[in-house]
């Protein structure tokens, strides 16, 4: 998996860019959200990426912000929404607007996106509202108040690593938080090891 590309932006259009990474030009599909934040052509650029592999093509999707990439991954996890539809959604509304519409179950906003019908909009809300509410709470005041100490970065890194290993976010958060309460100065590696027990 290609996590990100860091190179020179050699071409940009609202739908895609080309990034030169040490002499190799990567064509990357982007949303209008990402396009609006890109530097000028021939300047250094980093995009977080998702590689979609199909029978007929390998397509790279790129995002300036990791939060936009995460929302993209959440959207494509919904049955009936592919990468192209998710990109249309991210081009139609900002990440904040999409998250807000899902959390508040605003069917009208989701359905207002081109290509999203009533059933798909309902499915998006049904499948993502609880997850996004939990993510919102986890990144909100409750969590930040708990771990603003020297190990707040270790908490985030450990939870991310556990999720990559296939542990559900709520389980990972609970395990990491329990260990941090007992051992606030623990290293990230040790925190991950203890969380896996």
Image (spheres, grey):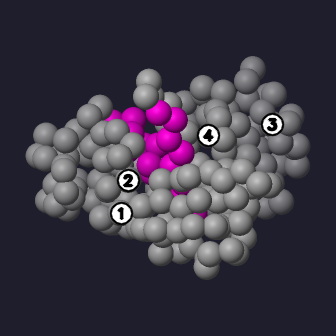
Farthest bottom residue in view: 40
Query: Of tags 3 and 2, which is closer to the observer?
Result: 2
Question: How many other residues sit within 10 Å of disc 4, few (<14), some (14-19) or many (≥20)?
Answer: many
| Sooner in the amino-acid sequence: mark 1 or mark 3 | 1
Relative height, residue 181 to residue 19 (above, below)? above
User: Could you tell me which residue is drawn at 34 percent across and 39 percent down?
Assistant: 82
Mark 3 vs 4: CB contact within 8 A: no
In the picture of the structure, the residue carrying the numbered disc 2 is: 87
Whether 118 is among the magenta residues is no
Question: CA separation, marks 3 and 4?
Answer: 11 Å
In the picture of the structure, the residue carrying the numbered disc 3 is: 191
Residue 146, which numbered label? none
Question: CA separation, marks 1 and 4?
Answer: 31 Å
Query: Of tags 1 and 3, which is closer to the observer?
Result: 1
Question: Taking the image as drawn, is residue 86 in sight?
Answer: yes
Residue 91, which numbered label? 1
Looking at this view, is 128 or 114 the one in front?
A: 114
In the picture of the structure, the residue carrying the numbered disc 4 is: 173
| Sooner in the amino-acid sequence: mark 3 or mark 4 | 4
């Amino acid at each position: 998996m290609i996590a990100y590309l860091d190179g020179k932006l050699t071409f940009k259009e609202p739908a895609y860019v080309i990034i030169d990474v040490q002499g190799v030009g990567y064509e990357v599909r982007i949303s209008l959200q990402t396009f609006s934040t890109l530097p000028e052509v021939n300047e250094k650029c980093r995009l977080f990426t998702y590689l979609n592999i199909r029978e007929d093509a390998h397509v790279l999707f790129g995002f300036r912000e990791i939060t936009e990439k995460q929302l993209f991954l959440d959207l494509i996890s919904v049955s009936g929404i592919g990468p192209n539809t998710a990109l249309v959604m991210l081009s139609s509304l900002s990440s904040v607007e999409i998250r807000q519409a899902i959390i508040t179950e605003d069917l009208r906003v989701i359905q207002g996106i081109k290509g999203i019908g009533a059933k798909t909009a309902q499915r998006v809300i049904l499948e993502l509202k609880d997850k996004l509410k939990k993510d919102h709470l986890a990144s909100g005041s409750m969590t930040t108040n708990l771990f603003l100490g020297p190990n707040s970065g270790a908490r985030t890194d450990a939870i991310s690593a556990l999720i990559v290993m296939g542990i559900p976010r709520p389980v990972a958060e609970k395990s990491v938080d329990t260990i941090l309460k007992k051992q606030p100065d623990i290293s990230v590696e040790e925190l991950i090891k203890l969380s896996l027990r």
